[in-house]
Image (cartoon, helix red, strand yellow):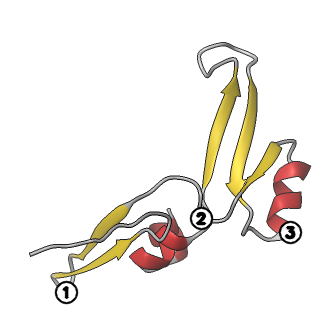
Amino acid sequence: MNVLDLGMSVQEAIEAPRFSLFAAPNFYRAGSEITVRIEDRISVEHLRGLQGLGHNVELAPSYSLGSIQAILKNTNLGTFMAGADPRRAAYAVGW
């Protein structure tokens, strides 16, 4: 989403604050309470915006949610760009 909608590089998108959803008791039961966990690097404005929309928001420590490595192909140029997640010891490698 950050690459396609916001024009970020693959590395910028990987490093951006991440969110996850938690449902109690689970996602399969209608009426479950949904909590949005989001890394605490988001702006106060975005946090208040989510809360203003009625979301139950819980802040997670910086760089704590998930892990991803990615390779993005530019089909116009035929080039590749790779990115690695600073949340874990990881590399993006290709040959």
Disc nearer the start of the sequence (1/2): 2
Q: Identify the element where label 1 is drawn.
A: loop
Q: In the displayed structure, would residue 76 be above or below residue 69?
A: below
Q: Are marks 1 and 3 in contact (CB under 8 Å)?
A: no
Give the position of the C terminus as an image quadrant: bottom left
Q: Amino acid at mark 2?
A: Tyr
Residue 63: numbered disc: 2
Kindly report which numbered mark, 1 or 3, lies closer to the viewer in this rendering. 3
Distance in Å between CA atoms under marks 1 and 2: 32 Å
The picture quadrant where one finds residue 27 is top right
Q: Residue at x 72, y 69 (%)?
A: 41
Residue type indicated by callout 1: Leu
**Vertical relation: 50 (above or below) 1:** above
Q: Pointer 1: what residue?
A: 77
Indicate which disc, 2 or 3, sits on the residue closer to the N terminus. 3
- Mark 1, residues whose alpha carbon is within 10 Å: few (<14), some, or many (≥20)? few
C-alpha separation, residue under disc 1 versus residue under disc 3? 37 Å
> Toward the viewer: 33 or 92?
92
Residue 23: image quadrant is top right
> Foreground mark, 2 or 3?
2
Instruction: Using a 10 Å C-alpha cutoff, classify the residue at mark 2 as few (fewer than 14 neighbours), some (14 to 19) or many (20 or more).
Output: some
Instruction: Read off the residue under disc 3.
Output: 45
Residue depicted at x 39% and y 59%: 68
Left/right of residue 13 with respect to residue 73 in the rendered view:
right
Depth check, front residue: 16 or 2? 16
Q: Nearer the viewer, mark 1 or mark 2?
A: 2
Where in the figure is residue 80, as x and y percent of width and height? 22, 79
Secondary structure at badge 2 equals loop
Q: CA distance from mark 2 to mark 3?
A: 19 Å
- Residue at position x 50%, y 62% in the image: 1
Q: Residue furthest bottom?
A: 77
